[in-house]
Each structure stands twice: as C-alpha cells, then as structure tokens.
Amino acid sequence: MLVTVFRSRLCAGAHDDYSAAVERMSELARTMPGYISHKTFHADDGERCTIVEFENEEGLRTWRTNPEHLAAQKMARQKYYTEYSVQVCTLDRESKFKV
C-alpha cells in the first residue's frame, strides 16, 4: 500500500471555491484503480492534512497523471494555496486494534 500525506494552507478567502473543487476531486479519486481511501484533517493553526491510500503504484500514478486532477493542481497553486507539501510513503508495517 502507498500512503500520500498532503499538507496545505489555504489563501484567505479561498475556502468556498476550494470546497467545490475538493468535492469534485474526492469524487474523481474514488474512481481511480487501486484507490482505498482518503481523509482530511484541519489543525487549529490553519494547516490541512489529507491522507490518501492506494493499493499500488499503478493506481497512484493513474491518479497523479489524470488530466482533470492535473488541471485542479495547477488551479490550486494559482488560486488556493499559500503552501503545500506532498509525501508519498510505502507501508512497511501495520497493526490495528478495534473493540
């Protein structure tokens, strides 16, 4: 499994337009081969963190090179983000607990 950690900060006043774009990208991501899940978290200091899971590199590559996703990335750099970082990690070990 591959895990992508996407951290970002939004420009002031970008939230409403950004929310619509995120909703569309969420829908699109779910259609990608090998997609497992994604969740976004918001910190008190304004940082946002999205964690995305894909089964394999092929699925992640399909997502990363999707034309609509590429266009959304370009728009985000121009209009929505003051900063972002992307880390792609390979899962080496996993443990779980659930009551």
Image (spheres, rainbow, N blue to C red):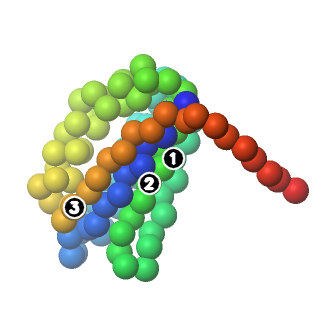
- Please tell me which residue is depicted at 43% across the width and 23% down the height of the picture: 57
Query: Which of the labelled discs sits on residue 38, or is there none?
Result: 1
User: On the image, numbered disc 2 is attached to which residue?
Assistant: 50
For this view, does 22 lie left or right of residue 81? right
Q: Residues within 10 Å of mark 3 (few under 14, many from 20)?
A: few
Figure check: 73 above or below 70:
below
Residue found at x 55% / y 42% = 37
Seen in the image, is 79 located left or right of residue 65? left
Q: Are marks 2 and 1 in contact (CB under 8 Å)?
A: yes
Mark 3, residue position: 83
Q: Secondary structure at mark 2?
A: strand
- Give percent across and percent down for residue 48: 39, 64
Q: Going by the image, does 12 lie left or right of 92?
A: left
Closer to the N terminus: mark 1 or mark 3?
1
Between the residue at mark 1 and the residue at mark 3, the CA separation in whole angstroms equals 20 Å
Q: Type of residue at label 3?
A: Glu
How far is disc 2 from disc 3 in space, using C-alphas? Answer: 14 Å
Counting other residues with Cα less than 10 Å from the Cα at mark 2, is it few (<14), some (14-19), or many (20 or more)?
Answer: some
